[in-house]
Image (cartoon, rainbow, N blue to C red):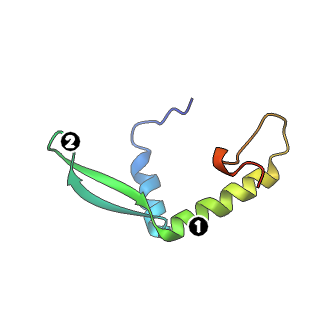
Amino acid sequence: MLQVETGCCIPVSIGLKAKGWIAASWELSDKGKRARYYQLTRLGRKTTRQRTVEMARGSRAPGIDLEPADQEGQ
């Protein structure tokens, strides 16, 4: 389980935006309140793919599978 502490998301999002890996926009939530929404940019998707491959190559421990289910065995 991943536990995220209060106040850590803003510094992380600022860093990811500065690197060009995510974009943010203000929109209305389902409840009609302003909310900040984030999405990966093209560079963010490319970086995520590269890092996933690097992690998969580096993880030789039994029971660790970092390949997406639809890409296994390719």
Q: Position of residue 13 (x, y in %)?
A: 43, 56
| Residue type, label 1 | Lys
Q: Check disc 1: other Cα within 10 Å, few if <14, some if 14-19, many if 20+.
A: few
Q: Secondary structure at mark 1?
A: helix
Query: Residue 3 in the image: x percent, y percent?
Result: 51, 32
Percent across and percent down for residue 21 are 49, 65
Q: Amino acid at mark 2?
A: Asp
Q: Quadrant of residue 27?
A: bottom left
Quadrant (top left, top right, bottom left, bottom right) of the N terminus: top right
Q: Are marks 2 and 1 in contact (CB under 8 Å)?
A: no
Q: Is residue 31 above or below residue 21?
A: above
Compare marks 2 and 1 and give the one earlier in the sequence. Answer: 2
Q: Secondary structure at mark 2?
A: loop
**Numbered tag placed on residue 46 in the rendering:** 1
Q: Residue at the location (44% across, 44% down)?
A: 8
Image vertical order of residue 48 relative to residue 35, above or below: below
Q: Residue at x 85, y 44 (%)?
A: 60
Residue 30 is tagged as 2
Q: CA distance from mark 2 to mark 1?
A: 30 Å
User: Which numbered disc covers residue 58?
Assistant: none
Query: Which of 36/62 is in front?
Result: 62
Question: Looking at the picture, does residue 13 appear above or below residue 23?
Answer: above
Q: Residue at x 32, y 53 (%)?
A: 37
Left/right placement of residue 43 relative to residue 70 reads: left
Q: Residue furthest left?
A: 32
Q: Position of residue 47 (x, y in %)?
A: 60, 65
Task: State the quadrant of the C terminus.
Answer: bottom right
